Image: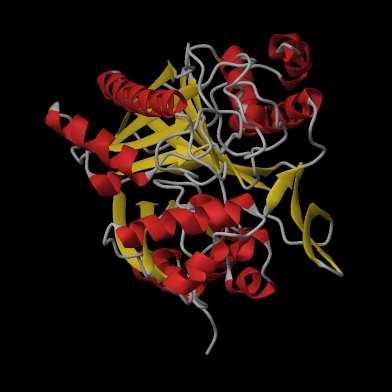
C-alpha cells in the first residue's frame, strides 16, 4: 500500500503552521480526541452489495474523532466524526444515553455525529440492512452486532476524553476549494447513469473550522467538510478512502492535533478519478493541502454563544404497496426486489405496521452571528447545500449531510422528479418501503428556515 508518510515531502512546500491573527473569541474552551476503531476480527463491510465475504485485510486504520466546544458557562457541544458508511440514529441515541448516565453534560441538540461514508468500513446494525439481498449467516450477523456495540463504546470513550482535555481556546473558520468532486448523475436515453457529469451541479467548497490554544501557538483541532461520496475504492479491505487518508496526513503533519472530516451534501457527487488507491491518495493530498493553506493564513474569528436547536419532521413515503403487490414481487428475478418484499411481508405477518413516513431530525448550530452550521441526516443531494447558500448568507453558511443518522438518500424535488438511484431506486437497499412522496425538499427547507436565526437570512428585495 502507498504510505501517506511518503507524501510529507510534498507538504514541505506548504510551510509550517504559524499562528495567524489573534482571534477575539477568547470565551471558548475546547478539547479533542482520536480513537482507533479498526476491528481485529472478520466482519462484513457496508456500502457495496457485491462483496459477499468478510473483509480480507486492513489496508488503513479507521478512526472516530471527537471535538468538545464550550462557550463560557454554556453546556458543551460535541462534534464526532466516524470512519463508517453510516452511523444510525439508534447508535447516536445510545451514545448520548451512556454519556448522560456517566454524568457528562451532553444534550441531544448539542451533539452532532458525522459519518465519512467510506464504503470500506464494517457494516453496522440498522444501516443498509437489505444491502446484500439476503440474510447474513448467523455468525456474520453476530460479528456485525459485536462491532456495532464496540463502536458505540469507543465513541463514548472518545467524547469522554475530549471533554476531559478541554482548555481555553480560540476558534476561527474559513472556506477553500477542492476539485475532485463531480456530479455523478449522467442523463442517457435509458435513464440516469452513475457516471461523471461535467455539467451537473456541484459544491466544491471546503469549510474549515480551526481550533487553537488561547495563545494561538497550538493547533488543537481542525474540522472540515466536503460534499462528495467517499467511494474512490471498492476493495474488500478496511480503508478510510480519501477522508481517512486526509485525516491521516493531517495528523502526521500536526501530531498533537485532531482532524475531523465530515461529508457535505454529496449524495450525487463522486470522486474522480476512481477505483485505484493512488487516486484516493491524490484526493486526500489535495484536500489536506487546502486545509493547510487555509489554517496558515488569517481566518474569520468565531465567537459565541453557540446556539444549538433541532426539529424533527416527518418525510412521507409515496404510495405504500399492498399485501398483494408485495406477494407479486416475491418471484421477481432481481433478488434484492424479492428480498425487500419478503421482509415487508414478514412485518405484516407479525402484525407490524409499515411506516408511512420517515422521522427526520434537522439540526442547526449558530456560532453567534459568525457561522451557521446546518446538519442534515442521510445521503443528501447537493441541491440542498446550493439552496441554503442562496437563502442564507453563503459566506457564513456550512451545510453537512450524513449527520446524526443515515436512513436513506434524501433527494431534492428536482432529483425526485428525474428519478434514478438517488431519486428512489436506492430505497430498496435501505429497507424503506418505497420512495418518498413529492415535496420533501420543502418540508426540510421549511424546518431549516424556522431554526435559522434572522441574522443569517438573505434580505430580498420586495
In this image, 46 relative to 218: left or right?
right
Residue lying furthest right: 189
Question: Splitting the image into 4 quarters, where does residue 53 fall?
Answer: top right
Q: Position of residue 453 (x, y in %)?
A: 36, 64
The total of numbered circles placed on residues is 0
Q: Position of residue 158 (x, y in %)?
A: 34, 22
Residue lying furthest bottom: 462
Residue 379 seen in the current view = no
Question: Splitting the image into 4 quarters, where does residue 91 fall?
Answer: top left
As drawn, 75 above or below 329: above
As drawn, 328 above or below 375: below
- Residue situated in front as seen by the camera: 197 or 46: 46
As drawn, 53 above or below 314: above
Question: Splitting the image into 4 quarters, where does residue 178 fall?
Answer: top right
Name the colour scheme: secondary structure
As drawn, 206 above or below 152: below
The structure residue drawn at horizontal position 54% and vertical position 36%, both measured from the top left corner, is 116
Residue 88 seen in the current view = yes
Give the quadrant of the N terminus: top right
Q: Position of residue 435 (x, y in %)?
A: 53, 67
- Residue situated in front as seen by the camera: 340 or 430: 340
The structure residue drawn at horizontal position 20% and vertical position 36%, both measured from the top left corner, is 97
- Residue situated in front as seen by the camera: 422 or 362: 422
- Residue situated in front as seen by the camera: 1 or 357: 357
Q: Position of residue 280 (x, y in %)?
A: 74, 28
The structure residue drawn at horizontal position 49% and vertical position 59%, both measured from the top left corner, is 341
Amino acid at each position: 500500500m502507498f504510505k501517506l508518510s511518503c507524501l510529507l515531502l510534498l507538504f514541505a512546500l506548504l510551510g509550517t503552521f504559524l499562528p495567524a491573527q489573534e482571534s477575539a473569541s477568547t470565551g471558548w474552551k475546547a478539547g479533542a480526541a482520536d480513537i482507533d476503531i479498526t476491528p481485529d476480527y472478520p466482519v462484513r463491510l457496508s456500502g457495496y452489495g457485491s462483496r459477499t465475504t468478510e473483509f480480507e485485510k486492513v489496508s488503513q486504520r479507521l478512526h472516530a474523532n471527537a471535538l468538545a466546544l464550550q462557550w463560557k458557562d454554556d453546556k458543551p457541544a460535541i462534534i464526532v466524526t466516524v470512519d463508517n458508511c453510516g452511523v444510525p440514529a439508534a447508535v447516536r441515541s445510545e451514545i448520548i444515553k451512556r454519556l448522560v448516565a456517566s454524568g457528562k453534560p451532553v444534550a441531544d441538540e448539542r451533539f452532532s455525529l458525522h459519518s465519512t461514508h467510506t464504503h470500506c468500513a464494517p457494516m453496522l446494525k440498522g444501516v443498509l440492512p437489505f444491502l446484500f439481498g439476503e440474510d447474513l449467516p448467523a455468525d456474520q450477523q453476530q460479528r456485525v452486532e459485536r462491532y456495532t456495540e464496540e463502536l458505540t463504546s469507543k465513541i463514548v470513550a472518545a467524547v469522554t476524553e475530549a471533554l476531559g482535555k478541554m482548555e481555553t481556546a480560540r476558534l476561527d473558520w474559513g472556506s477553500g476549494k477542492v476539485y475532485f468532486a463531480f456530479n455523478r448523475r449522467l442523463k442517457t436515453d435509458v435513464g440516469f447513469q452513475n457516471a461523471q457529469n461535467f455539467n451537473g451541479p456541484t459544491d466544491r467548497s471546503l469549510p474549515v473550522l480551526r481550533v487553537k490554544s488561547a495563545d494561538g501557538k497550538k493547533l488543537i483541532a481542525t474540522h472540515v467538510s466536503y460534499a462528495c461520496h467517499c467511494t474512490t475504492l471498492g476493495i474488500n479491505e478496511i480503508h478510510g478512502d480519501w477522508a481517512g487518508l486526509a485525516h491521516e496526513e493531517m495528523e502526521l503533519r500536526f501530531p498533537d492535533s485532531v482532524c475531523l472530516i465530515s461529508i457535505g451534501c454529496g449524495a450525487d457527487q463522486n470522486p474522480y478519478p476512481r477505483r485505484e488507491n493512488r487516486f484516493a491518495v491524490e484526493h486526500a493530498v489535495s484536500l489536506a493541502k487546502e486545509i493547510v493553506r487555509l489554517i496558515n493564513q488569517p481566518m474569520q474569528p468565531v465567537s459565541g454563544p453557540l446556539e444549538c436547536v433541532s426539529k424533527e419532521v416527518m418525510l412521507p413515503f409515496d404510495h405504500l404497496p399492498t399485501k398483494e403487490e408485495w406477494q407479486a414481487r416475491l418471484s421477481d428475478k432481481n433478488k434484492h426486489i424479492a428480498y425487500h418484499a419478503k421482509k415487508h411481508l414478514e412485518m405484516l405477518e407479525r402484525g407490524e405496521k409499515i411506516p408511512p413516513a420517515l422521522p427526520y431530525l434537522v439540526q442547526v448550530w449558530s456560532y453567534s452571528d459568525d457561522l451557521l452550521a446546518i446538519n442534515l441526516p442521510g445521503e443528501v443531494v447537493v441541491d440542498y447545500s446550493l439552496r441554503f447558500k442562496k437563502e442564507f448568507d453563503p459566506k457564513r453558511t456550512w451545510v453537512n449531510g450524513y449527520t446524526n443518522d443515515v436512513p436513506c438518500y434524501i433527494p431534492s424535488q428536482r432529483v425526485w422528479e428525474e428519478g434514478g438511484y438517488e431519486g428512489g431506486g436506492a430505497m430498496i437497499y435501505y429497507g424503506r418501503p418505497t420512495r418518498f412522496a413529492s415535496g420533501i425538499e420543502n418540508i426540510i427547507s421549511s424546518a431549516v428556515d424556522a431554526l435559522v436565526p434572522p441574522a443569517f437570512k438573505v434580505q430580498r428585495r420586495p
